Amino acid sequence: MGHALRQRLHQERFDGPHHEGVLNLLVAAAHMRAEIEAVCQAHALTGAQYNVLRILRGARPAGFARCEIAARMIERAPDLTRLVDRLIAAGMVERSRPAEDRRRSVTRITRRGLDMLERIQPRMDEIHRAFAARVPAQDARELSRICERVYEPALET
C-alpha cells in the first residue's frame, strides 16, 4: 500500500498508517476537486457556485434561505451572500422575500441556472463514470463508510 502516494508526494516513509491514510484522503479529495473545478471553470463557475446551483435545483420550486443553503454546502463558503449575489448577477438564481416574513429571503434557481446545470451534467457524469471504473461499488461503499467515520464526530460539535 502507499505506492501511488509515495510516488505522488515523492516521499518514501510515513509516520504510520494513520498519517498515510490522512495524506491519501487529502490527495484523493484534491484530485476529485480539481477535476470538478476544471469542469466548472470551463463554464465560468466556481465549484462552490455549482454546489449552490445543485442545492437549489433540489429545492425547487420553493428555494432555500441562506442558512439552509449553507447547511447543505459540501465545503463551507465564507461569504455565501456574495457567492449568491454573483449567481443573481449572472441570472442563474433569484432572491425574494416572502410576504409572511419580510426578514427572511429565499433564493431560487432560475431557468438559466437549470440550463447551466444541464450543460455541465455530461462532464460531471464522465467524472463519476471514471471514478466507478477505478473503484468498484463495494469499495465505494467502504470508502463512504470510512469517510463518514472521519467527519461524523465533527458534525456533533
Image: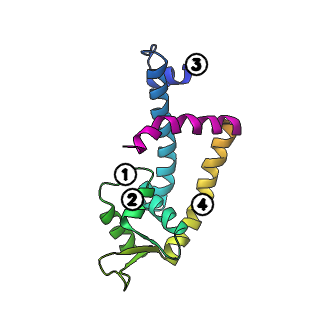
The residue pinned by badge 1 equals 76
Comparing labels 1 and 3, the label whose residue is closer to the camera:
1
Q: Is residue 121 left or right of residue 63?
A: right
Query: Disc 2 vs disc 1: Cβ atoms closer than 8 Å?
Result: yes
Secondary structure under tag 1 reads loop
The residue lying at 58 percent from left, 37 percent from top is: 145
The magenta region covers: 136-157
Residue 55: within the magenta?
Answer: no
Query: Disc 1 vs disc 3: Cβ atoms closer than 8 Å?
Result: no
| Residue type, numbered disc 3 | Met
Crowd class of label 3 (few under 14; some 14 to 19; many from 20; radius 10 Å): few
| Residue type, numbered disc 4 | Gln
Secondary structure under tag 4 reads helix
How far apart are the alpha carbons under marks 1 and 3? 32 Å
Comparing labels 3 and 2, the label whose residue is closer to the camera:
2
| Residue 120 rendering spot, x and y as whole percentages | 56, 61
Comparing labels 4 and 1, the label whose residue is closer to the camera:
1
The residue pinned by badge 4 equals 121
| Residue type, numbered disc 1 | Arg
Q: Is residue 116 above or below residue 147?
A: below
Q: Quadrant of the C terminus?
A: top left
Of 27 and 79, which appears nearest the observer? 79
Q: Quadrant of the N terminus?
A: top right
| Residue 45 rendering spot, x and y as whole percentages | 43, 61
The residue pinned by badge 3 equals 1
The tag on residue 120 is none
Of 20 and 45, which appears nearest the observer? 20
The residue lying at 38 percent from left, 73 percent from top is: 88
Query: Disc 3 vs disc 4: Cβ atoms closer than 8 Å?
Result: no
Crowd class of label 2 (few under 14; some 14 to 19; many from 20; radius 10 Å): some
